[in-house]
Image (cartoon, rainbow, N blue to C red):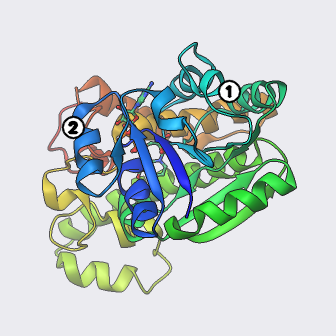
Amino acid sequence: MAVIGWIGLGNMGGHMSVNLVKAGHEVRGFDLNPAALDAAAAGGVKRAASIAEAVDGADAVFTMLPKGEHARAVYLGGDGVLAHADTRTLLIDSSTIDIASAQELHDAAAAAGFRFVDAPVSGGMSGAEAGTLTFMVGGEEGAVKDAAGYIGPMSGNIIPTGGPTTGQAAKICNNLMLFINLASTAEGAVLADRLGLDKQVFWNIASVSSGDSWALRTWYPVPGVVPTAASNNDFAPTFTTELANKDIGLAVSAAEDTGTPLEIGKHVQQLFQRLIDAGEAGKDCSMIIKLVDGSLEA
Ligand code: NAD
């Protein structure tokens, strides 16, 4: 069994790292937030007091951090991964970050003698807990193959995407579609209610009809319909509005770089921005329904 360093034990990384423990690996975790570290430790992750301690002697290091700026700091900082890991350690970044940051990490890792892959995931917090995430993995072929050997216990699908940064490209496009689907699901749900349909009856129909989507089946924004939905729990975050806004912003900015008109994506970005302006950045992104039913003035 392997020794794994893990940096970033939040909504996703906490569950993912615990699945590696369950598979028999020794996982040494580090997070700036003591509560996140406590939760992972309860699942068998060993506490590391620093990045240096987490990566010491590791066969592989995973990072699961919010944004490009966090990933750059964790890999490139003076107290970071490249400064402290051994070059035999395989580096795997599963955060969703911008392509320029991902390229910078690939370049810096290669220059320092490391193998590095970008390996973002899809499947939400429920998929992280169940070990059924889809990993999209970009990088040099041998490194991608070796990364798959560690990813197994956390995943339902491991899909090589091509060279460096292609995993991030796939993830950015996937999440553009996810958040548009979430917004359309919120609109359908509120309209169905106002037309007198029972919430469960409408969901039963849409989930086997052409209105179906992952957002509908996993994040239905009306409470009491889908067990994995944050709407059951007063929108306590499984995927924060702040990170959803970040992801759709990555798509909008990649679209600008490539001359691609994303009219719907840009509109959904404005909806998330309204939630953030109303002080809801830390709540679950499925709270977008409150802009449709009028229960949040924003
Ligand atoms: P989160 O905010 O819950 O967790 C991120 C963790 O990183 C936090 O615990 C934070 O304290 C820690 N962190 C930040 N900077 C750090 C540093 N310098 N050193 C150590 N720890 C640090 O976020 P999340 O929901 O787990 O998402 C993580 C990434 O995965 C994001 O890029 C997100 O877009 C992506 N993602 C999220 C979901 C989801 O459903 N939540 C699904 C797929 C992908």
Q: Residue furthest top?
A: 78
Image coords of residue 87 (percent x, y):
74, 35
User: Horizontally, is 283 left or right of 67 in the view?
Assistant: left
Q: Mark 1 vs mark 2: give the one in front.
A: 2
Residue 1 showing in the rendered view: yes
Which residue sits at x=55%, y=32%? 249
Residue position marked by numbered label 2 in the rendering: 35
Q: In this view, does 114 lie above or below 108?
A: below
215 and 195: which one is in front?
A: 215
The earlier-in-sequence mark between 1 and 2 is 2
The x, y position of residue 12, in whole percent, is 40, 51
- Tell me the number on the disc at residue 101: 1
Q: For numbered disc 1, what is the local secondary structure? A: helix
Cα separation between marks 1 and 2: 28 Å
The location of residue 88, given as percent across then percent down, is 73, 42
x and y, in percent, of residue 170 in the image? 69, 52
Q: Which residue lies furthest to the front in this view?
A: 57
Q: Which of 8 and 191 is in front in this view?
A: 8
| Type of the residue with mark 1 | Ser
The residue at the point 33 percent across, 62 percent down is 219
Quarter of the image for residue 233 reads bottom left
